[in-house]
Image: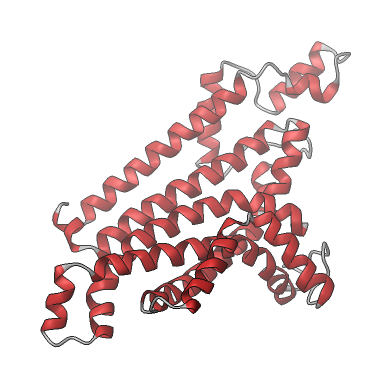
Amino acid sequence: MVKYIIKKLIILIVTVLAVSFVIFMLFSIIPSDPAVNKLGINATEESLAALRLKYGLEGPALVRYFRYIGGVCTLDFGKSYTYGMKVSQLIGERIFINIVLSLMSLIIVTVVSIPVGMLLAHVDKTKWENFIEINNQVVMSMPPFLLGIILTFIFGIIFKFFSPGRYIAYNKDFWGFMGYMICPALALSLPKCAMCIRLLRSSILEEKKKDYVKVALAKGNSNGRALYKHILVNAIMPTITFISMILADMIAQGIVVEQVFALPGLGRCLLNAISTRDYPVIEGIILIIATSIVVIGTLNDIIHAVIDPRIREDL
C-alpha cells in the first residue's frame, strides 16, 4: 500500500510539472510584450529593460521556466503586471472563497445524494418514483448559473434571506459570509446531486441482481445488512469516482457562479487578468486549478485502494 501511494505521489508531481511547463511555454510564445503593454510604445529601451528585469522577463524561455518553477516551489508565482504585488498574495486573498464554496458543495452532494440514492433503490415502481425521477432530470439538466439566478430570485428577492450582490467578507463577518455562501454552493451542487443519486441508485440495483447478494440473503442476512455490508461497498465505488470528478468540475464551474453572486474569488480575478493580459496571475490561477484537479484524482485512486481489497491485492 505504501508503494502504491508513493507511486501515485510521483505521478502527481510529474503531472504538475508537465502542466506548469506547458502553461508557461504557451504564455511565453504569445506575441505580446508585457513591458510595452504597461509602459506604451513610446517608452525608452532603458525603461523597458528595467521593467523586464523587475518582472523576470529577461533571458531564454527555458531559463525563465526553471526560475519560475523554483519560485512556485516556495509559493512565489511572480509579480502581477497590473497590481504590482505578488501573485501569491493576490491569490491568497481570494482562494479561501473558492475553498469554502467547493467544500460546501461537496458536503451537500455527499450528504444528500448517498442517502437519497439508497432510499430510491428500495422504492417500487410507483408514481412517486416517477415524480422524483422527473424532478431529478429537470435539476440535472440545469446549468449552475441558471440555478444561481433562480435561487437569487427566490431566496434573495422574494424571501429576502440575503441581499443579492452584497457580498459579506469572511474577515469581517464570518457567519454572515457562510450564510451568503449557501446559495452559491446549492447552485453548484444541486445538478451534481441529481447525477449522483441516479448513478448510485443504478449501481445498487445492478449489484442486487448479482449472485453474492442472493448468497448473503440465503445465509440469513436482512435486506438492510446485505445493503450496508455487501451491496453498498461495491455500488459506492463508481459514485466515489464520480464525486471526485464533479469536485474537479465544480472548481472550474465556480468561476461562473462567482459572477452570478458577485463573489470576489479566483474566477473574477482570472477574468480581470485575462482582460488586462496579466500573465503571471493567469498562470498562477490555472496552475492552482490544474494542481487541485490532479490532487483530487490521486486521492480518488488512494481511497479506492483503501476501500476495495481487490485493488490492494494487485499492488
Number of marks present in the image shown:
0
**Vertical arrangement, residue 173 with respect to residue 276, above or below:** below
For the N terminus, the image quarter is bottom left
Q: Nearer the viewer, residue 250 or 269?
A: 250
User: Is 227 rendered above or below residue 72?
Assistant: below
Residue 85 shows in this picture: no
- The colouring scheme, among rainbow, by chain, secondary structure or one colour, is secondary structure
Q: Kindly identify the residue that appears in the image at 71 percent across and 27 percent down.
A: 54
Name the image quarter holding residue 41.
top right
Residue at x 25%, y 71% (from the top left corner): 208
Viewer-closest of 67 and 285: 285
* Image side of residue 14 versus residue 218, left or right: right
Residue 270 vertical placement versus 124 (above, below): above
Q: Report whether 122 appears left or right of 243.
A: left
Nearer to me, 207 or 92 = 207
Picture coordinates of residue 84, whole percent (x, y): 77, 38
Q: At which x and y percent is residue 310?
A: 17, 59
Residue 89, x across and y down, in percent: 68, 48
At 63% from the left and 65% from the top, the residue drawn is 185
**Left/right of residue 95 with respect to residue 287 in the rendered view:** right
- Residue 80, x across and y down, in percent: 72, 37
Q: Is residue 149 left or right of residue 206?
A: right
The residue under the point 18% across, 74% down is: 213
Report whether residue 46 is seen: yes
In the displayed structure, would residue 23 be above or below residue 137?
A: above
